[in-house]
Image (tube, rainbow, N blue to C red):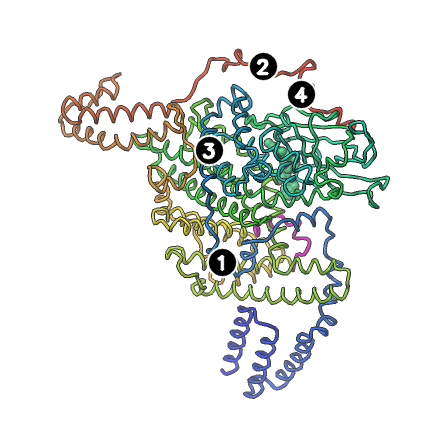
Amino acid sequence: MFTLAWIVAVLVVATALAYVNAAGIAWTAAIAVALGVAWAAQLLPPWLTLGLGVLFVVLAIPLNVPALRRKLISDGVLAAFRKILPPMSQTEREAIEAGTVWWDGDLFSGKPDWKKFLALPKPTLTAEEQRFLDVETTELCELITDWETTQVHRDLPPHVWQYIKDKGFLGMSIPREYGGLGFSGFAHSQVMTKLSTRSGTVAVSVMVPNSLGPGELLAHYGTDEQKRHYLPRLAKGLEIPCFALTNPTAGSDAASIPDFGIVCWGEHEGKKVLGLRVTWDKRYITLGPVATLLGLAFRVFDPDRLVGDKEDIGITCALIPTSHPGVEIGRRHMPLNAVFQNGPNWGKDVFIPMDWVIGGQPMLGRGWRMLMECLAAGRGISLPSSGTGMAKLAVRATGGYARVRTQFKTPIGKFEGIEEALTRMGGNLYMMDSARMMTAAAVDLGEKPAVISGIAKLHITERARQVVNDAMDIVGGKGICMGPSNFLGAAYMQVPVAITVEGANILTRSLIVFGQGAIRCHPYVLKEMEATRERDRAKASVDFDAALFGHVRFALANMARAFVMGLTGSHFVGVPGGVAAETRRYYQQLTRFSAALAFLSDVSMGTLGGALKRKEKLSARLGDVLSLLYLCSATLKRYEDEGAQKADAPLMHWAIWDAMFKAQSALEGVLSNFPNRLIGAVMRRIVFPFGRPYVIPSDKLGHDVARRMLEPSATRDRLVAGSFVSKAADDPVALIERALVATLASEPIEARIKAAAKAGRFDGRLAPGSGVDALVARAQEQGVITADEARTVLAARDLTARVIRVDDFPQDLGTSAMRPLDYGKAGVAANLPNVQDQEVAA
Ligand SMILES: Cc1cc2nc3c(=O)[nH]c(=O)nc-3n(C[C@H](O)[C@H](O)[C@H](O)COP(=O)(O)OP(=O)(O)OC[C@H]3O[C@@H](n4cnc5c(N)ncnc54)[C@H](O)[C@@H]3O)c2cc1C
């Protein structure tokens, strides 16, 4: 009996020590006391107590004496690590080391510091940024329609290009001292979001110069002279930039580009100068066909050792005027009918002077690191903003449409099937917008959040796809038939662009989020890896020992925390004071899942080692948990920042509940597919001791979310805040907004007409062929409704008729009036870009 109590007490104390990540000396003291009690009270057979005592002394001495511990334990593990750690290429290392660790580090720690998180400032705009958003951005949206752009001009119309250049849209992120607007990341994001509620083409055209490209690279790495020359010209649109990395053979694996430059002497402007002879073949380059300045990435080789002692210098970025002899550029791809400028470019043995390298000669070979650093910040702004903008457009227009479009005498938005899709749209958008804002805010805090920007890009663009798909299902044929009154078809077609660029989503999910996250966000893994590469053996031994034993305690702590929080349902986890009562449990549950993630990650890395990199399905699921924790945190922060509006609570609840269910499924996916079934089963008992706590969000909650999207309200306004609605009378989204208001005003009047007809106050039957107008007129004649009310009903009907209208065209779809594609003299073959050049290069 006493023995049993002792065993229970030992287990409880051990769990408690692990839970609080107790120091080694505390463990030693606790074990000594436990053994002392067992000896004194004769709780165990003497031989067992003696044996345990000897074992304790044998282990405790080396574990508590660092020099001994290193000699006996960690140095051996370090040697084994050195052998088994997969070799890391320089580009892999640069990608992993790029950027900073921010809130992702907390989420990976198993113990996120919510107080610190909630104290982060709410992102805001300066007065000037707000004015730019309200005036110039609105004006730009008003200047353009997707239909005109894609079908008439197949480009932005010239006056729109001019407006973009004149107002500084291309230099939003260029510092003011160089003539740019010097906007914050949040302002940039707000502008991109608004433009994306209007036209994908204009959004992409503005996005690229403000994202990863010549401007950003120059601002961070350019020489003073390069900055002084180019930045003011880029800011004013006197130069149109593009950035070319992708090669036909190197897309996702961009570090393997075969494009090369040889260091050599050559002639430039009549002088003999040191430079590079560059050969390249690029495709998919946005703005390429109209660019005046080509940012180019290629690998530099120095066979004659003209700049140092290495032959393979590495990836380098240079700026080449597109007018430079040998630069072949101007042909276009057609990216899903989006008609933003995009195309290939190539060149063979083109000599460029050394000072065209961004940052000059010292930056030879530093291109990959430059790209990764800039990507770490830029990826978190552009595509998340365009995805959110698209979703705002879809939610605003589709919610309104679902309310005014009736079938079976009922607004389609009131059918449960449609309601389900609407719910997903609303909940997803609430979460997407939260993550967009929080990520932009991180950039403004000086972070270059490499992992978080990948999460934001991946998950916001995926959710944008889901939102747009749901919207397409809801609007039916109206979304399918293209024309000026289709508000959704263009977004539907263009969604895959965001999925594919800046790290295709499957790759980002399978390889980047967890792969990079586990190394960067984990408090010890990178330190261990660095120690294995350390050449000073004494330093390596000390560093590795500290990291290894810190890691062991960290892993034990997360195991204990995951288990205890699982047993207690995380009810006892501390929550920062002042948070909205309805969100308290989420902080506790997110902390629990954070500990579970940290625990599973350590076991996965510990048992699978380098093989985890190839186990992409496991890695993707672990990455999903990290991502969903980030999305949930962002959602909670937004809810608090917006004053915990009770009316918005269903959106917040649905988004988090849905995400937590998905996080739970991802954890389950790891557990049930873990290569070692026994370890998987043990981990399941630790993480989910009483089974899985989450079920899908309830239908009642879903109903509350959908209802908010069907009627104008402050909640709906906040959900679609920052989206553009045209003043043009025939604009499809503006028409929906007006029809929605008119329908809500008309419905009670129509109900009175129906009731009066039913009560026999007038003949409510419609003669064949007579319109509803006749019924309204009759009701007015009979005094059932006033003239004003009759006008209200007729106006609503007229607006609804215009909303549900789709475009039709002549039988040849107007092609006879259109200029056919110019296939050139050689016909279609001439449109196959630079095939011969590829052969030559091969
Ligand atoms: C419209 C558009 C604009 C673009 N603009 C530019 C630009 O301005 N500048 C520029 O340099 N590039 C640009 N790109 C190129 C873009 O970055 C690439 O398309 C992207 O990197 C993917 O390369 P890929 O298309 O060759 O696909 P691939 O690399 O062939 O990938 C195909 C699929 O395989 C998946 N995949 C690849 N490797 C893995 C892996 N290890 N694990 C799991 N899945 C994997 C990918 O996720 C993808 O789903 C643009 C592309 C498009 C379509």
Image disc number at residue 116: 1
The residue mark sitting in front, 1 or 3, is 1
Residue 503: in magenta span: no
| Residue 528, picture quadrant | bottom right
Q: Badge 4 local density, few (<14 within 10 Å), some, or many (20+)?
A: some
Report x, y in % for residue 746: 25, 30
Name the one closer to the observer, 6 or 741: 741
The kind of secondary structure the magenta stretch mainly shows is helix
Closer to the N terminus: mark 2 or mark 3?
Answer: 3
**C-alpha span from label 4 to label 1:** 56 Å
Mark 1: which amino acid? Lys
Q: Residue at x 66, y 77 (%)?
A: 60
User: Under tag 4, what secondary structure?
Assistant: helix
- Give the residue pinned by disc 3: 197
- Give the residue pinned by disc 2: 820
Mark 2: which amino acid? Pro
